Image (cartoon, grey):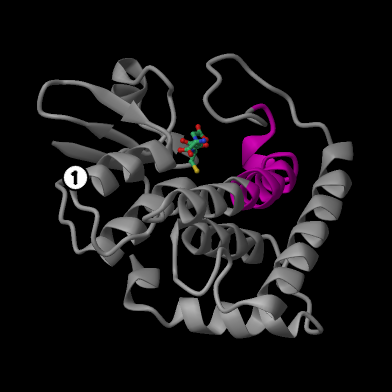
Amino acid sequence: MKLYDWKPAPNPRRVRIYLAEKGIDVPRQDVGAGWGLSPDFLARSTHKLAPMLELDDGTLLGEAMAICRYFEAQQPQPCLMGDNPKSMAVIEMWERKCDFEGVQAVAEVFRNSVPALADRALAGFDVPVPQIPALVERGKLRVARFYKQLDEQLAQQHFIAGEKFSVADITALCAIDFAKRIKLAIPEDHTHLLRWYAEVSARPSASA
Ligand SMILES: N[C@@H](CCC(=O)N[C@@H](CS)C(=O)NCC(=O)O)C(=O)O
């Protein structure tokens, strides 16, 4: 088994934090090459995205949460994806929101503004995809709404999907640290979100 990883990127980090929380050690290979992925990895990967998990039978698994789901089924404890129908659904709902409205909103700003990605505005494409500058402002609106929704949610409960730490917290943390790289930090008046951010950032897994 091998995990194809890319240290500076937010989606591979979702898997690294998850594995650290579970105490699972998987052989890894960093497939980054500058602002993109190495030609070797691109040639053999169907999705042309990291992370990617290669199983011993050669199966290639893409998508951060599909990789986590594979390990969760093998080693349920500590439980990070719910242990009953309701908690599983609530965690999945919040994790998907943190991906679509968090990671992907930040990526919209990042990929449409960073000069090094001028013709690579969408990940995973092998043809040039030019940036659309108007998407930067729209992405910022999405990120601001994401922060507000999380702040409201965290006023009600300790972690994003309830009273226990879960994959929803992992995805939210990766989205927020990705946003900080482009100076979209949590606003100072979002006190509940800041309380949560300080706590999850202090977990040993956050340095994964
Ligand atoms: N939905 C995918 C997203 C994967 C993704 O976008 N990965 C980025 C790194 S964060 C990537 O591989 N980008 C390749 C590139 O920029 O060329 C997941 O959950 O794993």
Residue plotted at (69% across, 33% down): 118
The N terminus - image quarter:
top left
Residue plotted at (25% across, 62% down): 22
Residue 195: image x %, image y %?
62, 85
Vertical comparison of 132 with 139: above or below:
above
Which stretch appears magenta?
A: 97-119
Vertical comparison of 39 with 206: above or below:
above
SS type, badge 1: helix
Q: Is residue 87 magenta?
A: no
Residue 199: image x %, image y %?
50, 83
Residue placed most toward the observer, 23 or 72: 72
Tell me the residue that label 1 is attached to.
74
Furthest residue in direction front, as rendered = 85
Vertical comparison of 40 with 199: above or below:
above
Furthest residue in direction left, as rendered = 56
Q: Is residue 103 magenta?
A: yes
The C terminus - image quarter:
bottom left
Instruction: Say which quarter of the image contains residue 167.
Output: bottom left
Residue plotted at (40% across, 47% down): 12
Q: Amino acid at mark 1?
A: Gln
Residue plotted at (43% across, 34% down): 63
13 on left or right of 176: left
56 on left or right of 167: left
Residue 96: image x %, image y %?
59, 45
Vertical comparison of 202 with 34: above or below:
below
Observer able to see residue 182: yes
Residue 75: image x %, image y %?
19, 52
Q: Residues within 10 Å of mark 1 (few under 14, many from 20)?
A: few
Q: Main secondary structure of the magenta part?
A: helix
